Amino acid sequence: MTRLRILTFVALMTALAAAPALGQGRAPLRTAALRDVAFIAGRWSGEMGGGATQEWWSAPEGDGMLGMFRYVKGGKGVFYELMSIDQTAEGPVLRLRHFGPGLVAWEEKDGATSWPLVETRANRAVFEMPDGRKRLTYHRASERAMTITLEEMENGSWTSQLFELTAEP
């Protein structure tokens, strides 16, 4: 092999080793605790697709936090989410379940999705599905501003959707 091919091969192998395997997410943060995600607590509102969003989170108490999301457009509820962040032996885990009007669940009867916490630092937390194909990043930029970024792997590349929220009084 030529020197250039060897260097290219080494660079490629290093990049592949550093990235999570396809279909396998990052390891949960076993050392993390609810206090690391307490910044999410509060009443938040924003806009999405011509409609209004609200997301409310309780402060941590016991071994969890509870949350609710709703999306209203044209004066009608489009969909809702019920959420919890539970302290587990594996670290905090975000559990989420979607509902349409009439509280008709999108997921199966026992089908809440689970998103272990995989990364945290001051006012920032990343939850990722175990298969590594979806992640939610909560970032509190200030006392009154928080962004939530939903990233999904689609056709070999990442897409992202940004939700900009403002604290409600």
Image (cartoon, rainbow, N blue to C red):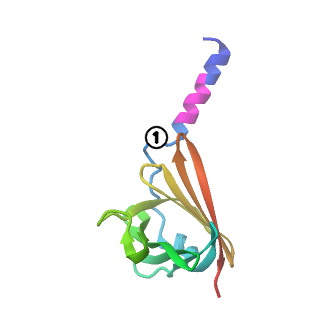
Where is the N terminus found, in terms of image quarters? top right
Residue 6 image point, x, y percent: 61, 18
Residue 48 image point, x, y percent: 62, 68
The residue indicated by pointer 1 is: 22
Whether 3 is drawn above or below 60: the answer is above
Quadrant of the image occupied by residue 23? top left
Camera-side residue of 75 and 62: 75
Q: Main secondary structure of the magenta part?
A: helix
Magenta stretch in the rendered image: 9-16
Q: Is residue 102 left or right of residue 55?
A: left
Residue 33 image point, x, y percent: 47, 69
Rendered residue at 29%/66% (across/down): 109
**Residue 128 within the segment the image draws in magenta:** no
Rendered residue at 44%/60% (across/down): 116
**Residue 10 within the segment the image draws in magenta:** yes
* Callout 1: SS: loop
Q: Is residue 97 left or right of residue 71?
A: left
Q: Quick check: can you spot residue 40?
A: yes
Q: Residues within 10 Å of mark 1 (few under 14, many from 20)?
A: few
Which amino acid, by three-letter code, is at mark 1? Leu
Q: Quick check: can you spot residue 85?
A: no
Rendered residue at 56%/80% (across/down): 75
